[in-house]
Structures are given as structure tokens and as C-alpha cells.
Image (cartoon, rainbow, N blue to C red):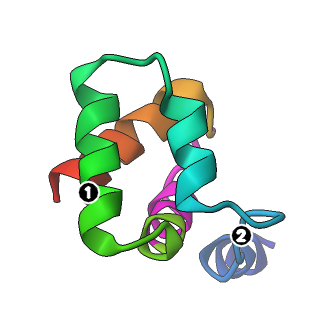
Amino acid sequence: MKELVRYLLENLYLDFQGEISLDQVRQFLRGDDSKEAKALLQKLIEDKGVDDLLLATADVLKEHLRTGINEQVIKQELTNYSES
């Protein structure tokens, strides 16, 4: 049973439902003057969209499945992405 559980966790596919555009992200970040929000927006502008963000975020969040994904974990991973 342990091997099956480990296999399923390692091969679980995490994805985001729906579409999101750079303009939508701008709207979400509007009014957020934090350093993290500004850095993330700048990174997305350099990347010319959110596709890389979504792929990278889903990939790193997979590592948190065993311990839990919550708002703090997602915020930290978005900050890590903007600093990469």
C-alpha cells in the first residue's frame, strides 16, 4: 500500500482550472503596493504572460501536497517565482 500511495503522490498532476491573462493578474494585484506584488508583476511582464508562472507554480506546489497547500505556501511560491 505504501508503494502505491508514494507512486500516486509522485505522479499526481496539478493544474489550474480556467484561463487567466496578464491583465487579470494586474487587476488582482491592483492596490497591492507590496514589494512581492510589484516583483511578481515585473517578472510576468518580462516573461510576456502568465504561462510560465502557472507551470512553475503547479510544479512546486506538487511538493507541498503531503504537508498541505494553503495561502501562505502559494504566496511564498509566487515570491520565489518572481525572484527567479
Q: What amino acid is found at the position of numbered circle 1 in the picture?
A: Lys
Give residue 40's position: percent from left, percent from top. 32, 45
- CA gap, disc 2 and disc 1: 21 Å
Give residue 18's position: percent from left, percent from top. 83, 65
In the depicted structure, whether residue 61 falls above or below residue 10: above
Please give the label number shown on residue 43.
Answer: 1
Q: Does residue 44 appear left or right of residue 31 in this picture?
A: left
Q: Does residue 19 appear left or right of residue 32 in this picture?
A: right
Residue at the image position 34 percent from the left and 31 percent from the top: 37
Q: Could you tell me which secondary element the residue under label 1 belongs to? A: helix
Residue at the image position 71 percent from the left and 75 percent from the top: 12
Q: Does residue 43 appear left or right of residue 68 in this picture?
A: left
Please give the label number shown on residue 29.
Answer: none
Q: What amino acid is found at the position of numbered circle 2 in the picture?
A: Asp
**Which residue does the numbered mark 2 point to in the structure image?**
15
Q: Are marks 2 and 1 in contact (CB under 8 Å)?
A: no
Question: Residue 9, can we see it?
Answer: yes
Q: Does residue 47 appear left or right of residue 6 in this picture?
A: left
Q: Quadrant of residue 6?
A: bottom right
Residue at the image position 47 percent from the left and 16 percent from the top: 31
Give residue 46's position: percent from left, percent from top. 24, 67
Residue at the image position 48 percent from the left and 60 percent from the top: 57
In the depicted structure, whether residue 27 falls above or below residue 21: above
Q: Which residues are magenta?
A: 56-68
Badge 1 local density, few (<14 within 10 Å), some, or many (20+)?
A: some
Q: Quadrant of the N terminus?
A: bottom right
